[in-house]
Image (spheres, rainbow, N blue to C red):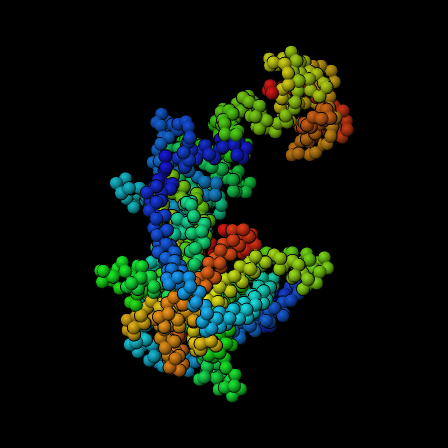
């Protein structure tokens, strides 16, 4: 009984490798913790401390100024829209890459990771050049009076680009491992292909799809480099929250910058948490957890 | 359908279901040609080895699936679906577990859900692909008996694929033995056991040992020994299949006598297994010996061949 | 005959493939093509002339320097973290793993911001630093720190799952055969994780050289001093010096392509040496 109690009580320092285990725990664990604290934890703690210095009403005051509100709205709404578009097209891309074989499938598969590898500034100027009124694609829309670059539509394009790999890369492995027999079972029971997809395949992919959407959304909300070149950055119209943080920093308004950053972090974490919970529920239901 | 792995049992079953398309030949359901019927219109009840239950649906919804995906015109009303699901749950002895998730059931229970799901569409034929293959021995035996009873009660035409002889011979009215994509023999369990049609069946069913022999008119030569035997086969090389029950210890005189040396004596269930060498280069054969009698390792004994199962090679 | 209950009809198949390729072409191929086409718009001479600019040259040098500092540091960290997490048991392990992933969920701008709050002129340690006449923000140390922050998890997250999958049996066997701990690590552990290590370094390096947001916040954009390549791209672009901007960008795009090719080779040829999630 005492053993059971012991295993639940937190012990510190936690260095209790099993007797006879490998050496080097102390030094590697110590370095890991120190480095993590110095590079990540302490700096982030300073942000929280700085923001808490403002107090809740202080943060509220900064966050509810019309310009900040507009920027937050732009960031979150367009990020959500981009994540949803990526959900749809990401599903199709993942499906095509796992289920069909066609010449060039492997290089195309590899190219999906381009937005991870391409520096955001490069993506930003490339997209701006493409979608500017005189760009390859912008020129196609110009005659109809549709402006893409330097409008919220441009932000949307950049965020679709940046979030593109997430849904593909989360759905793809699940689709690959999906038991073909459940699709066959569905067919023998009289279901059409469409019914099989919506009633059997899609529910099985749902947790992965939600994860992909959440990751794409989180990435889009924080994205800076690829957006600023194509956004136009007009306050109240096409200004994103990260840009506003930079603007505040340039004015040495550390408090304002921290407040906006905190609000962004809180909303993103809340969204991630909600989706994680949703996922945990559906996983438990399917018995994976 | 019985056969070693890779013999084409599952492929044949999937062809019947419409999960694979034949390159030649026809598939008849009763007298009706179903070769080009898509799988969803064949009304087969397919049960997979690894259940293939829909993890995101409850047990009841799994069973109801085949009814719910019907076009509106032929779909039974909700109440009727619920009634049928309850009846099927009762049939597979899982009443009260309808709201569970498949993950919360044991392997044997999951396979019964899969069976109920297949039965729900009122299939014209029930196709079972090694349905007990993933279960442990005790559960297998129980389910086998239960399935036989269920079959007798519902009367569905059932195709059952297995590589387990005991399972096939106990369950089936008729057994098809498959080898390398061909059916070697179709018959009752007695037929395939007692009257194997081909050398493969003779060697595959029962614990038979294959001995190379030489046939002469009215005689059989085995490892330097000769037995007088009327076999009706052409002279030349042939194969003799010997099961433990085909040989018995005998007095040294009389017809059909072989001498052999005891290689080992082992206890096997209620009797003993005696391993015997007829000649140096031949595979050893086994016989069963009642506990009352004793032989020793290295002892020379005389054997009588009761049922010669001979195939020209 | 194709059974449409088991697979999609040929038409659906073609339409879906068409949509997928069209979507990827629009969002991946076209931007990449635009970079090189804009860079070469005025011909090869103009393209090459862009690299004569001393500011551009110093930006390239700084980028290489930053990567040369940040990648090895994160490499050492990644190995240490993976060793202690994968080969030992301690309470709070999964919390530690999530903390290591934290920089991935933080906006690049916020990654820069936290260092400004710490070391900036009006930051927590700012006055102390200025007393010592030591600059971190608007100087190279700040850029290094911000780069380390954003590339922090790359190597660790490749190694941790792989080393967890591999367990401790081989190391224990080596130890029972008389090898020292360090020797065991060098001769048993390291060869087992070398492809995953390379994979992590590849991704870490790509991000270290290409990071924009975090670096932009702490750099101060001082020409010839604190400009990395991505920042130089921004400056040239904002000066409407498009050919030069895209010329520098083409180098970074080339780096991205090399990274992708290397990554794919590792996944396809040496997939057995990567953690399960990376295998193809």
Is C94 located above or below residue A247 in the figure? above
Query: Farthest bottom residue?
Result: C131
Q: Residue at x 28, y 39 (%)?
A: B74
Q: How many marks?
A: 0
Task: Please indicate, yes or no, whether residue C46 appears anywhere in the rendered image.
Answer: yes
Query: Farthest front residue?
Result: C45
Q: Residue at x 50, y 72 (%)?
A: C62
Is A252 located above or below residue C104 in the figure? below
Residue C220 image offset from top left, x and y in percent? 43, 78
Q: Residue at x 41, y 69 (%)?
A: C233
Q: Is A30 placed left or right of A42 in the picture?
A: right
- Position of the C terminus of chain B, as image quadrant, is top right
Q: Is A29 placed left or right of B148 in the picture?
A: right
In this view, the residue in front, C230 or B51, is: C230
Q: Residue B18: which quarter of the image?
A: top left
In this view, the residue in front, C69 or A125, is: A125
Q: Residue at x 69, y 57 (%)?
A: C174
In this view, the residue in front, A74 or B127, is: A74
Is C109 located above or below residue A201 in the figure? below
Residue A194 image offset from top left, x and y in percent? 33, 45
Q: Is A73 placed left or right of B26 in the picture?
A: left
Q: Residue A88: which quarter of the image?
A: bottom left
Residue B161 image offset from top left, x and y in percent? 48, 34
Q: Residue A59: which quarter of the image?
A: bottom left
Residue B117 image offset from top left, x and y in percent? 39, 42
């Amino acid at each position: 009984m005492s053993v059971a109690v012991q295993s639940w009580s937190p012990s510190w320092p936690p260095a209790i490798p099993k007797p006879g285990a490998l050496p080097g725990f102390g030094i590697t664990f110590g370095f890991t913790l120190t480095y993590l604290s110095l590079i990540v934890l302490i700096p982030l703690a300073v942000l929280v401390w700085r923001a808490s210095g403002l107090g809740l009403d202080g943060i509220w005051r900064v966050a509810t100024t019309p310009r900040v509100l507009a920027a937050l709205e732009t960031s979150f709404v367009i990020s959500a829209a981009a994540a949803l578009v990526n959900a749809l097209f990401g599903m199709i891309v993942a499906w095509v890459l796992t289920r069909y074989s066609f010449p060039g499938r492997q290089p195309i598969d590899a190219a999906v990771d381009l937005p991870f590898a391409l520096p955001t500034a490069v993506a930003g100027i490339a997209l701006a050049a493409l979608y500017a009124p005189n760009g390859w694609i912008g020129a196609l829309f110009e005659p109809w009076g549709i402006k893409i670059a330097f409008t919220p539509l441009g932000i949307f394009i950049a965020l679709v680009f940046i979030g593109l790999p997430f849904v593909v890369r989360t759905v793809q492995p699940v689709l690959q491992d999906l038991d073909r027999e459940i699709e066959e079972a569905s067919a023998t029971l009289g279901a059409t292909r469409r019914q099989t997809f919506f009633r059997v395949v899609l529910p099985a992919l749902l947790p992965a799809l939600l994860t992909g959407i959440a990751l794409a959304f989180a990435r889009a909300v924080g994205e800076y480099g690829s957006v600023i070149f194509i956004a136009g950055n007009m306050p109240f119209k096409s200004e994103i929250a990260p840009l506003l943080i930079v603007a505040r920093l340039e004015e040495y308004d550390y408090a304002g910058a921290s407040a906006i950053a905190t609000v962004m972090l809180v909303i993103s974490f809340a969204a991630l948490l909600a989706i994680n919970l949703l996922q945990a529920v559906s996983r438990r239901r399917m018995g994976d957890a | 359908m019985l056969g070693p792995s890779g013999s084409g049992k599952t492929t044949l079953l999937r062809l019947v279901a419409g999960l694979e398309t034949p390159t030649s030949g026809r598939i008849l359901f009763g007298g009706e040609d179903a070769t080009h019927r898509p799988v969803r219109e064949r009304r087969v009840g397919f049960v997979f080895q690894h259940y293939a239950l829909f993890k995101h649906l409850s047990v009841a919804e799994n069973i109801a699936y085949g009814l719910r995906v019907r076009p509106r015109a032929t779909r039974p009303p909700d109440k009727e679906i619920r009634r049928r699901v309850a009846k099927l749950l009762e049939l597979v002895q899982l009443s009260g577990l309808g709201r569970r998730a498949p993950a919360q059931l044991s392997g044997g229970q999951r396979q019964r859900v899969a069976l109920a799901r297949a039965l729900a569409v009122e299939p014209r034929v029930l196709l079972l692909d090694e349905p007990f293959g993933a279960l442990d021995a005790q559960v297998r035996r129980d389910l086998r008996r239960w399935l036989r009873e269920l079959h007798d009660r519902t009367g569905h035409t059932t195709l059952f694929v297995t590589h387990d002889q005991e399972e096939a011979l106990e369950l089936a009215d008729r057994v098809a033995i498959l080898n390398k994509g061909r059916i070697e023999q179709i018959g009752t369990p007695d037929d395939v056991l007692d009257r194997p049609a081909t050398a493969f069946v003779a060697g595959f069913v029962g614990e038979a040992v294959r001995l190379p022999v030489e046939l002469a008119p009215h005689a059989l030569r085995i490892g330097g020994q000769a037995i007088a035997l009327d076999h009706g086969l052409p002279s030349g090389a042939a194969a003799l299949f010997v099961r433990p029950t085909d040989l018995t210890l005998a007095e040294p005189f009389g017809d059909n006598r072989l001498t052999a040396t005891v290689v080992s004596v082992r206890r096997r269930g209620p009797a003993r297994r005696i391993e015997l060498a007829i000649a140096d280069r031949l595979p050893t054969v086994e016989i069963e010996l009642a506990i009352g009698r004793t032989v020793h390792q290295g002892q020379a004994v005389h054997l009588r061949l009761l049922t010669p199962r001979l195939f020209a090679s | 005959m194709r059974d449409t209950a088991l697979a999609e009809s040929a038409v659906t198949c073609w339409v879906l493939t068409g949509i997928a390729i069209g979507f990827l072409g629009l969002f991946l191929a076209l931007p990449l093509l635009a970079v090189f086409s804009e860079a070469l718009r005025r011909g090869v001479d103009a393209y090459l002339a862009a690299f004569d600019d001393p500011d551009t040259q110093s930006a390239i040098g700084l980028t290489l320097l930053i990567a040369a500092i940040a990648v090895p540091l994160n490499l050492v960290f990644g190995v240490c973290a993976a060793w202690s997490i994968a080969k030992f048991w301690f309470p709070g392990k999964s919390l530690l793993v999530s903390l290591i992933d934290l920089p991935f969920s933080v906006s690049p701008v916020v990654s820069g911001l936290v260092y400004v709050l710490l070391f900036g002129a009006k930051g927590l340690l700012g006055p102390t630093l200025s007393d010592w006449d030591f600059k971190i923000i608007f100087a190279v140390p700040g850029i290094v720190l911000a780069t380390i922050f954003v590339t922090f998890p790359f190597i660790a997250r490749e190694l941790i799952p792989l080393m967890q999958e591999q367990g401790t049996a081989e190391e224990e066997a080596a130890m029972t055969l008389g090898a020292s701990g360090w020797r065991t690590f060098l001769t048993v552990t390291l060869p087992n994780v070398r492809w995953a290590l390379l994979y992590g370094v590849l991704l870490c390096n790509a991000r270290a050289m290409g990071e924009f947001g975090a670096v932009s916040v702490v750099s101060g954009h001082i020409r010839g001093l604190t400009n990395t390549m991505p920042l130089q791209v921004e400056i040239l672009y904002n000066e409407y010096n498009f050919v030069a901007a895209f010329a520098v960008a083409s180098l970074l795009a080339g780096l991205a392509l090399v990274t992708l090719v290397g990554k794919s080779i590792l996944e396809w040829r040496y997939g057995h040496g990567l953690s399960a999630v990376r295998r193809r």
